[in-house]
Image (cartoon, helix red, strand yellow):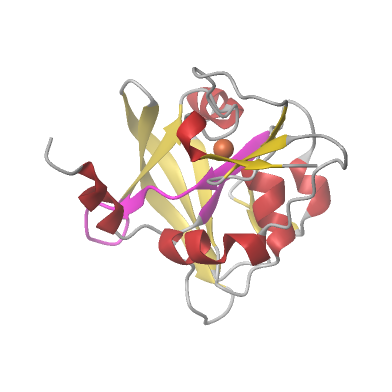
Amino acid sequence: MKNKKITRKIIQGMYVLTTIGGGCMVDAVSQVSAGDNPLIAVAVMKKNYTNELLKKNNKFALSILGEDINPEIISTFGMNSMRDMNKFEKVTAEEVEGVKVLTDSLGYMVCEIIDSIDNDTHTLFIGKLIEADVYKEGIAMSYGYYQEHKEELIKITTETGKTAWVCTVCGYVYYGEEIPDDFKCPICGVDKSLFKKKEG
Ligand code: FE
């Protein structure tokens, strides 16, 4: 491949995907058909707990994040697993069609899952839009905007006196003088090259 970096020019947004029992941040979302109940495709990492939940549930919701989003939402849904905490305790949500959506967002889409395709890393879930609403007007946050403003959006605090490696994609912190060569971020799956060393 001559230069895979061109794939970074694909414009993606920032969303909180929720389903019954959990949720996570996603960026790979696309409307893939037209009509009154268009199809919405979303890719979710296989090792995410949310992926397991989606395979049991028949619905998901996407809350669309604006550029003015409360950073707490990103750190809650982007850097933690529902296996370890109840993310919904930290945000305001309402239930629509049985799925919790975040009220501090631009709006939501609720979909019924009609198909899914597994690849090596992700599952592509295809849902039919069954309910949607706009909470407020605003600029939707793109993945590029998030990357540029990550430092302000997610305040990463590391323990003093310890050498930390911070995942530049999701903010996960690994403690240790050296990070193993085969290390993969347990939250977002990226490899060692995307971790930045921070001396404590
Ligand atoms: Fe990460």
Asked if residue 182 lies left or right of residue 100, the reply is left
Q: Left or right: where does residue 101 sit relative to residue 117?
A: right
Q: Is residue 65 magenta?
A: no
Q: Position of residue 175 (x, y in %)?
A: 74, 29
Q: Residue at x 64, y 45 (%)?
A: 171
Which residue ends up furthest to the bottom in the rendered image?
A: 137
Q: Residue at x 48, y 78 (%)?
A: 139
Q: Quadrant of the N terminus?
A: top left
User: In front: 93, or 29?
Assistant: 29
Q: Start and end of the magenta stretch?
A: 15-39
Q: Quadrant of ligand 1?
A: top right
Asked whether residue 190 appears in the rendered view, the answer is: no
The residue shown at (26%, 58%) is: 9
Residue 192's place in the image compared with 76, above or below, is: above
How far across and down, in percent of the image, does residue 28 sit?
38, 47
**Quadrant for the C terminus in the image:** top right
